[in-house]
Amino acid sequence: MRQRHDEQPTPTKTLADQSMVRAKQWTRTVRAARPDLPGDAEKQMIVTTCETFIADILKPRFLPDIRPTEWNYVIDIHGAWAAGRYRFMQRYRSGMAHNRGEEFDAPFARIDRRGPDRFDIYWMRHTGKWWRLHVGVTLSEALRILETDSHLHPV
């Protein structure tokens, strides 16, 4: 087949070009060690303190009353402890015709226990990813930050 004068010939790889290609290689990544889980007494103290914070601060400020709508609407603010973390969540109820009454949780903030009275504070982005905003604060500082930082407030 004849090559037209406006076409460029396809280059061929030489042995030198082929030897410069780097082979793929597996590498091992090391994750940071998780701190030990707290004892039952410390865990209960954290959960009780967070539940009191929700009842005394978050609910009166962000959920003074429940207002049903034709869309999803907030019916509760609550929390849950799991694996050394306490998540603050809003419970929604659907008002749409096809799934009226169905409920679901949407977390908005989280505190991770990093050691005795040391916590990291995370914010749930609209993308569903957690972002760490504060590192190494005490529980009382974490709750004060949750109260004052508007990024960490329920929607």
Image (spheres, rainbow, N blue to C red):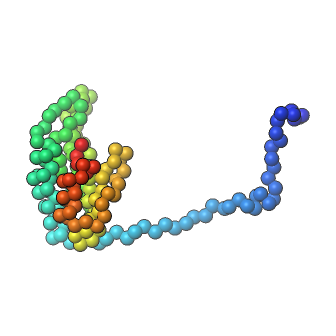
Q: Nearer the viewer, residue 84 or 103?
A: 84
Compared to residue 86, the image places residue 1 above or below, namely above
The quadrant of the rendering that contains the C terminus is top left
Q: Residue at x 63, y 61 (%)?
A: 24
> Where is 69 relative to 149, above or below?
above
Q: Position of residue 62 (x, y in %)?
A: 16, 44
Q: Residue furthest top?
A: 97
Q: Nearer the viewer, residue 101 or 14?
A: 14
Quadrant hosting residue 72: top left
All told, the count of numbered labels is 0
Percent position of residue 46, x then y = 17, 64
Q: Where is residue 48 shown, x and y percent of the image?
A: 13, 61
| Residue 41 position in % (x across, y down) | 15, 70
Q: Nearer the viewer, residue 122 or 48?
A: 122
The answer to whether residue 38 of the structure is visible from this angle is: no
Quadrant where the N terminus is found in the figure: top right
Please tell me in which quadrant of the rendered image residue 122 appears.
Answer: bottom left
Q: Nearer the viewer, residue 150 or 7?
A: 150
Instruction: Please tell me in which quadrant of the rendered image residue 49 appears.
Output: bottom left
**91 shown above or below 54:** above
Residue in the picture at 21% in, 40% down: 92
Q: Is residue 11 visible?
A: yes
Q: Is residue 27 left or right of residue 11?
A: left
Residue at (81, 55) in percent of width and height: 14
